[in-house]
Image (tube, rainbow, N blue to C red):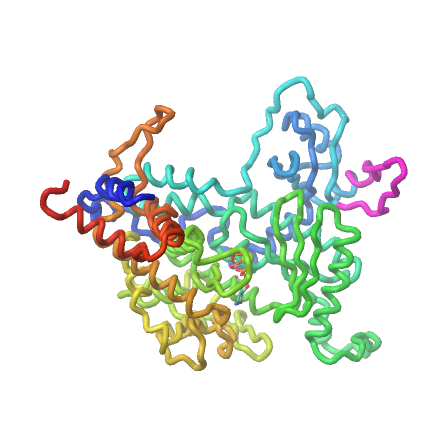
Amino acid sequence: WSNGQLLKYFRRKLTPSLRGTGTSAAVCQPRPDHEDAGKTFVVLQEERRERAERSVLISCPSKTSEKKVLKFLSKHGAINNCFFYDGYGTYAVVEFANRDGIHSLHEATSLPSVLHEASVPFKSRLLNLKGNGVDQSNGPTSLKLHTQTSPPINDLIQRLAAEESIDQQLHSLTSTLELTNENVALRFLVCSLIKDIAGAFFPECTIRPFGSTVNGFGKLGCDLDLFLDLDSVSGSSTKRPSGLSVEYQVKRVASERTVTQSVLSVVGEGLEQFAPGCVGVQKILNARCPLVRFSHQPSGFQCDLTANNRVAMKSSELLWLLSRVDERVRCLVFMVRSWARVHGITSSIPGPWITNFSLSMLVVFFLQGRSPPILPTLDQLRDLASPADKCVIEGNDCTIVSDLTKIQLEQNTEPLETLLQEFFEFYSTFPFNRMSINIRKGKQVHKPEAAALHIQNPFEAGQNVSKNVNAAQLERLVALCRESAWLLAHGGVSVPPSTVRVASSGVAKAAPWGVAALLLPSVAEAAGVKGRRKKKREPASERIKSLLQSLNKPGKK
Ligand code: CTP
Ligand code: MG
């Protein structure tokens, strides 16, 4: 934007701040009751995994009706749930009441026969439904399609602009971007389909999703982190000795890491050769945490499969637990993650950028420090744990309470608007050069090692979760926090929601304000991008500041 455009933009926005008006109702309590309320993380994940094992993924004709598909499939068994979505074609996720439905379906399924090409003799649960009377090529489709992607940023900004307070905007942002039940079911189904391949080598293995799929902070379109869990196999060695043990299993290899690498190598090979829909399989076995990366085309998920990564599973449980303590946690994490993405602080490419996981840690630490605290410390979560919660992984005490109802905190009623602004202020002035973020204690502690940004890994005290972040990226984060804090504090992003502008289409649209304005790439970036083209421009924050100041000068309105 030119100076003139920026000036116009802020003139429209410079109206009294909405702070404190009508937002108190949005002060959050623990998430409302629904069917999952009261369940522990482990129980919830196990239920979803079991449902996925009774499910199939079916490629359907694009013009069909739900009734026809269900009529055809229910010949094979009772169906508990079914939904449709559009990706690389139209797909149905069908959950049978029990596995007999899948067996019956498989018996009726034939392998495809293509002239001059041989098919792999393996019946997966990714099926193709053509003919059988389900096709209605003449009529329109009557399928209700569930979206699996988040809306484009401009649509999101418009939606937020129509809200009446910053608190409502943050709730709306979260509910628009969060994973839907259907998307989570699809993620568990993909894990289960991958298990069918890995199970050919390791029949007792389990594939579990971790990271943002299950930690409460997943956004539609986020990657799918999978964990190949062989513990149910190796765990059996800890059972009472029966006088019988398997013949020496592990070849003489240097370390557990080498075993992980060879396990992932064969599973990666299996995925590449036999897993339908898995494309672009890359074995990244020399990484600090070896992984197999691939795309699962029918679901559109970018997948990272790791093994021997139990601590990451536990930190997913920790974040999930914290996300359930108070709804404001999710609202802030969704906002900070979206804001960081829009302004290029996070990236989908690995590098010196801060990760979403580290950003979540920053939010957790900030909320632990409120008065009264909105989140407990990790030590408090450990102290609340029952004996059954005890968990030690590779010598690290990873014990946390599993029963959410045991977490009782003094009531904090700060509105989200205040929290967001103070989050930005807090990190604008945090002494990153000397201090480390420690969510175990809920206190900043002296940095144990030189690193631009030091965030102690919650369960591995010796590890820094953000050791990849360099000084330049940290500086960008701090500068953007400063700018956003400044804009929120000075009303630079506030405008009455009644202000509308008429778009060229003639449709009235609310002008971006509040959180919507903070997500406008143009506010912070446009000046920077233009500045890069023309030499010697002031930094964006300086330009915005001087523009705002110029608005207050006599003679200007
Ligand atoms: N993890 C970790 N230490 C890191 C990075 C990641 O322990 N330095 C663990 C965390 O449990 C994290 C998970 O690995 O949740 C997956 O990492 P990643 O995909 O980077 O983060 P997500 O939380 O899944 O967020 P995103 O939406 O960006 O995928
Ligand atoms: Mg992830």
Question: Which residue in the rendered view is the most extreme toward the left?
Answer: 554
Question: Which residue in the rendered view is the most extreme toward the front?
Answer: 535
Q: Nearer the viewer, residue 316 or 278?
A: 278
Could you tell me if residue 144 is visible in this image? yes
Could you tell me if residue 386 is visible in this image? no
Region in magenta: 105-124
Question: Which residue in the rendered view is the most extreme toward the right?
Answer: 116
Q: Residue at x 55, y 61 (%)?
A: 350
Q: Residue at x 67, y 64 (%)?
A: 284
Q: Nearer the viewer, residue 42 or 439?
A: 439
Question: Which residue in the rendered view is the most extreme toward the top?
Answer: 138
**Figure label count:** 0
Q: Position of residue 298 (x, y in %)?
A: 66, 42
Q: Nearer the viewer, residue 341 or 192?
A: 341
* Left or right: residue 557 compared with residue 193: left
Q: Residue at x 58, y 55 (%)?
A: 45
Q: Which quadrant, please, contains the N terminus?
A: top left
Q: Position of residue 36 (x, y in %)?
A: 50, 50
Magenta stretch containing residue 331, yes or no? no
Q: Nearer the viewer, residue 206 or 33?
A: 206
* Left or right: residue 554 compared with residue 337: left
Q: Which quadrant, please, contains the C terminus?
A: top left
Q: Residue at x 57, y 64 (%)?
A: 313
- Please, is residue 60 above or below residue 440 in the view? above
Q: Position of residue 183 (x, y in %)?
A: 56, 45
Q: Main secondary structure of the magenta part?
A: loop
Magenta stretch containing residue 109, yes or no? yes
Q: Position of residue 261 (x, y in %)?
A: 71, 69
